[in-house]
Image: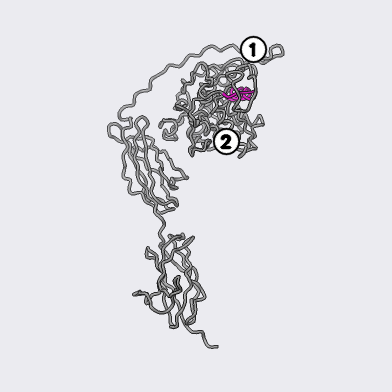
Amino acid sequence: MAAQFGRRLRRGATTTAVAAAAVAALSASQAPAAPQSDSAAGDQTAAGATPSGDSAATGNSPYHTDLPPLNTPNKPGTSVNLPVTGSAEAGIPASVLAAYKKAEQELAGTDAACRLPWQLLAAIGKVESGQARGGKVDANGTTLSPILGPALNGQGFALIKDTDGGAYDGDSTHDRAVGPMQFIPSTWATWGQDGNGDGRKDPNNIHDAALAAGRYLCAGTRDLSVAADLDRAVLSYNHSTEYLRTVRSWFDYYKRGTHEVPDGTGVLPADTGGSTASPSPTPTTGTSGGGTSPSPTPSPSNPGGGTAPSPPPTTKPPTTKPPTPTPSETFGSLENAGTGTLTATAGEAFGERVTVRAKNTLGKPLARTPVTFALVGATDARFADGKTTVTLTTAADGTVTAPVLTAGEKTGTFKVTAVAGTTKPRALSWTATVTARVADTIALTGDKALTAAPGAEFADRVEVRTTYKGTGVADTAVTATMITDAETPAENDKGPYFKDADGDPVRTLDLTTGADGVLELPKIYADDTEGTYTLRLITASGATVTVELKVEAAPAA
């Protein structure tokens, strides 16, 4: 590896290998749910190679691939307060360095067996974005401007159609890698983290991105102190042996020492200036990945291995201007396509689904237009699979319908939005209302006969339960009344009674059910008049149950 330190990987040749590796890794899956299998082994960097069943976290940034210098830093260090010492390349911007070390500490507490070293995050961050473009981040660690990889449109890169409605990458047609650790939006949807505790998972924030990268690298049972596991983790991030070698070289370099530099002063590759795009790679021949030949092997007389000769420059592919879409292909407007009132009872599905229609600039239906449906506001309502945001594509008639929306337990209102278009997005919104369950049934929980002797109290309590479609409903108002006749009910002025707070007889009480809709009535007392009496319990919705109460003298011995 030392032989590589004296040179820089050239953007035309070796960088192409890294970019081609991204094509191979990304083309396997549009929405990876887990890191690449640890069984991946061979070099699949050749353009067009597709690792079967594998995926990658990153969309690859082929513009930050310089190798570290041959001379190592003067002073190793782990403190973020170290002064600037040694090679400028060993300097890592303060916020970026702090994010890497914080992620290491977090993983040490939640996944100690992984043994994630922060230097590995630093190595990947260097290759992917030049440490967030030399540390150009704000006080919260968010990049001052987006760091985006090239559009994954199948033209020199993988073909990955949009998975986030342009929410992260601003592209509603194809995905792009996003942020300082260059996550594909679909991978971020699975692995995104809130590393700085601001309640958001932002791939453009170095704290969030570093923690997400750490968790991704630690997936499964990997122990990154084991060389083989570390290699598998890096390959899962970007399946390319050239990428692995580059990350490994920076990892070894940073382990020998680094230091903190002010944000915005980090070193960028000399030939890029920190740009966020790269021309489509032009494959070369003669190597497995289209890259440069390896450096000569060090010998006792030449321990550094010397500087490898630079390969011949490659020809930059001609730049072709994409054709301008015709008016019939250009998104123009978004309209409601018949969505009704959005209401649902807690825990149930909404009867209506949001439907919209996309039109072109001529006012005609526009097919294949991505529309992002999102839930906005304090709600636990969810689309299918617990999602709060879903992106779907319009049909031939320009319409698309959101998935079924199911209410949670939180009552009140929230918004459902539909957004389409990138350069001139159009948005629609609807108010959705979740109402509390209202009991439709009230029933006795037992079947004991309720009797008492004149002047005594009833030995057993009356207990009822209110339900809505079989589910208990707490906090249901129930009125209990001793009535004269079930056919023409009126409050009885004799027979069984309750007692108020002063101990006086009352024959009507307003009560409320408790947990799971259960209500146990207060004690009932009998006066001196024998007979059969009726107790009626009724809810505000009209659900009713009656109870028979008998007052009779005990039989003679």
- Nearest the eye: 528 or 448: 528
Give left or right: position of 423 versus 250.
left
Majority secondary structure of magenta residues = helix
- Nearest the eye: 70 or 313: 70
- Residue 371 locus on image (x, y percent): 38, 37
Total count of labels: 2
- Residue 102 locus on image (x, y percent): 58, 33
Give left or right: position of 265 versus 110.
left
Q: Quadrant of the C terminus?
A: bottom right
* Residue 254 forms part of the magenta stretch: yes
Please identify the residue farthest to the left as the structure is shown.
362
Q: Residue at x 39, y 35 (%)?
A: 370
Q: As shown in the figure, which amino acid type bears the numbered disc 2? A: Arg
Q: Residue at x 41, y 30 (%)?
A: 171
CA neighbours of label 2 inside 10 A, class few (<14), some (14 to 19), many (20+): many
Q: Which residue is mark 1?
A: 306
- In this rendering, the answer to whether 327 lies above or below 1 is below
- In this rendering, the answer to whether 324 lies above or below 338 is above
Q: As shown in the figure, which amino acid type bears the numbered disc 1? A: Gly
| Residue 175 visible from this viewpoint | yes
- Nearest the eye: 372 or 20: 372
- In this rendering, the answer to whether 370 lies above or below 505 is above
- Nearest the eye: 385 or 264: 264
User: Looking at the image, do the residues carrying marks 1 and 2 touch, with CB atoms under 8 Å apart?
Assistant: no
Q: Which residue is mark 2?
A: 215
> Which stretch appears magenta?
243-260
Q: Residue at x 64, y 12 (%)?
A: 306
Earlier-in-chain disc, 1 versus 2: 2
- Residue 80 locus on image (x, y percent): 59, 28
Tag 2 secondary structure:
helix
Give left or right: position of 59 versus 77.
left
